């Protein structure tokens, strides 16, 4: 039996209590009036509400494999990276190119990359496509998370190769300054022309390179500690190290937001790697009994919903990726809370929770294994999910900002 009320979390913003954790210094961003539906230049004050819509439109009868990454360029176009080799076998000949460009409405613009790029003698295409970033000059950066994906690639917007940092299968660990190790995310900081890498599937560090030459600049681990390889007998999760550093974003005021998915926390640094503060998130030991009771008769992807909720809660992974609102102050910080299948909206100045939305499931406005997101200049969000259950792999959605209410 399917529940008939699916959209309440999208329409009614939830005012959260003050977060019981370390918060950033400074006062809360101004939020005294009622904001309008955000447009270009509108103030992002108060608490936002969203409604999910289907997005995008795929041409040529194409299908997606596991959709893992999103980015936005200076023209407001959305870039998506997916894994064509994971498309269902019967549909693999219809798999779209690995890198796809759309406008905000979901209209297809161009696509390139994927298995056909594996034969190149200039560069090494990753075994598992994972992260994507478009820099201020329109160049497209790609990271892979598969075994041996120890390289970062840089292309022009139309897929012409420019630069490779590292070599496939060459990593020597957390002190290696030439190679990454199954990097999860990349971000080019225009102010310093540097590439910041969340080097998290094989290593446990942030590493920084020159965005033009690929020259190594610096690296750091959790709390700004020097990154090291795990030692024999080390606890499964030592809080002094990242557990799975999965995302990295840099705000306009130069703060580096690091998503430690396995550590279930957000850590914030300067661009030089100085630790500033952290926020633990999503540390729920067990699924909420009320949620389990409410979903007891539901199915998602053809299996009992409660089984999937238990499986993802048991993985103990939370902060997957972050994104910023488009106002000059970037007042809202969006956090993908993986195990809880929700997007959490924080006041970026204080890291206090303003609202959250989404829930576990396979219908529009629901999520399963939320993996990445980005925001456009109108305040809308775009999300992708890495879900392979039952061949249901094209989980991409747009979340339209419908209004802002006062705190």
Image: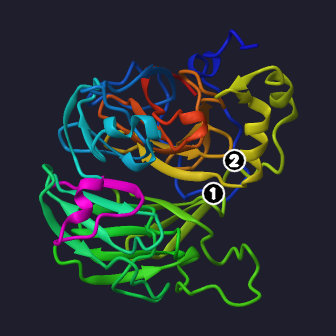
Name the quadrant of the N terminus: top right
The answer to which of marks 1 and 2 sits earlier in the sequence is 2
Residue 126 lies within the magenta run: yes
Image location of residue 247, percent across then percent down: 47, 58
> Label 1: few (<14), some or many (≥20) within 10 Å?
some
User: Does residue 147 appear to the left or right of 313 in the view shown?
Assistant: left
User: Does residue 144 appear to the left or right of 299 in the view shown?
Assistant: left
**200 to 296, vertically: above or below:** below
- Disc 1/disc 2 C-alpha distance (Å): 9 Å
Mark 1 residue element: strand
Q: Quadrant of residue 261?
A: bottom right
**Residue ID for mark 1:** 279
**Contact between labelled residues 2 and 1, with CB atoms less than 8 Å apart:** yes
Residue 233 lies within the magenta run: no
Viewer can see residue 134: no
Mark 2 residue element: loop
Q: Residue at x 65, y 27 (%)?
A: 14
Q: Nearer the viewer, residue 77 or 405?
A: 77
Q: Residue at x 42, y 70 (%)?
A: 270
Q: Which residues are magenta?
A: 115-137
Identity of the residue furthest to the front in this view: 90
**Residue ID for mark 2:** 19
Image location of residue 138, percent across then percent down: 16, 52
**303 to 67, vertically: above or below:** above
**384 to 103, vertically: above or below:** below
Image location of residue 246, percent across then percent down: 51, 60
């Amino acid at each position: 039996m399917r529940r008939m009320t699916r959209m309440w979390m999208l329409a009614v913003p939830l005012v959260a209590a003050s977060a019981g954790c370390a918060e950033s210094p400074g006062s809360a961003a101004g939020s005294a009036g009622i904001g309008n539906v955000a447009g270009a230049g509108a103030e992002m004050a108060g608490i936002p509400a969203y409604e999910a819509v289907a997005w995008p439109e795929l041409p040529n009868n194409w299908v997606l494999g596991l959709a893992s990454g999103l980015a936005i360029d200076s023209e407001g176009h959305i870039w998506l990276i997916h894994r064509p080799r994971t498309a269902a076998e019967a549909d693999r000949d219809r798999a779209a190119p690995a890198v796809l460009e759309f406008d905000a409405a979901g209209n297809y613009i161009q696509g390139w990359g994927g298995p056909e790029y594996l034969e190149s003698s200039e560069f090494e295409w990753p075994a598992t496509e994972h992260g994507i970033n478009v820099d201020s000059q329109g160049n497209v950066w790609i990271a892979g998370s598969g075994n041996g994906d120890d390289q970062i690639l840089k292309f022009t917007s139309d897929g012409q190769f420019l630069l490779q940092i590292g070599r496939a299968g060459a990593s020597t660990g957390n002190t290696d300054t030439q190679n990454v190790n199954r990097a999860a995310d990349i971000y080019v900081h225009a102010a310093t022309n540097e590439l910041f890498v969340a080097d998290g599937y094989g290593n446990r560090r942030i590493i920084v390179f020159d965005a033009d030459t690929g020259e190594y600049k610096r690296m750091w681990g959790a709390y700004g500690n020097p990154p090291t390889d795990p030692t024999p007998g080390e606890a499964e999760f030592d809080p002094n190290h990242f557990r799975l550093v999965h995302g990295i974003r840099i705000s306009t005021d130069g703060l580096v937001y690091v998503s430690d998915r396995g550590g279930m926390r957000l850590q914030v640094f300067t661009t030089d790697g100085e630790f500033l503060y952290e926020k633990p998130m999503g540390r729920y030991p067990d699924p909420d009994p009320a949620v389990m009771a409410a979903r007891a008769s539901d199915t998602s992807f053809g299996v009992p919903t409660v089984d999937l909720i238990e499986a993802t809660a048991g993985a103990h992974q939370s902060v997957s990726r972050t994104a910023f609102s488009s106002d000059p102050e970037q007042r809202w910080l969006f956090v993908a809370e993986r195990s809880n299948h929700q997007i959490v909206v924080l006041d970026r100045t204080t890291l206090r929770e303003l609202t959250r939305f989404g829930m576990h499931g396979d219908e529009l406005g629901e999520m399963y294994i939320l993996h990445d997101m980005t925001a456009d200049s109108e305040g809308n969000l775009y999300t992708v999910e890495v879900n392979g259950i039952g061949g249901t792999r094209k989980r991409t959605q747009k979340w339209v900002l419908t209004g802002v209410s006062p705190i």
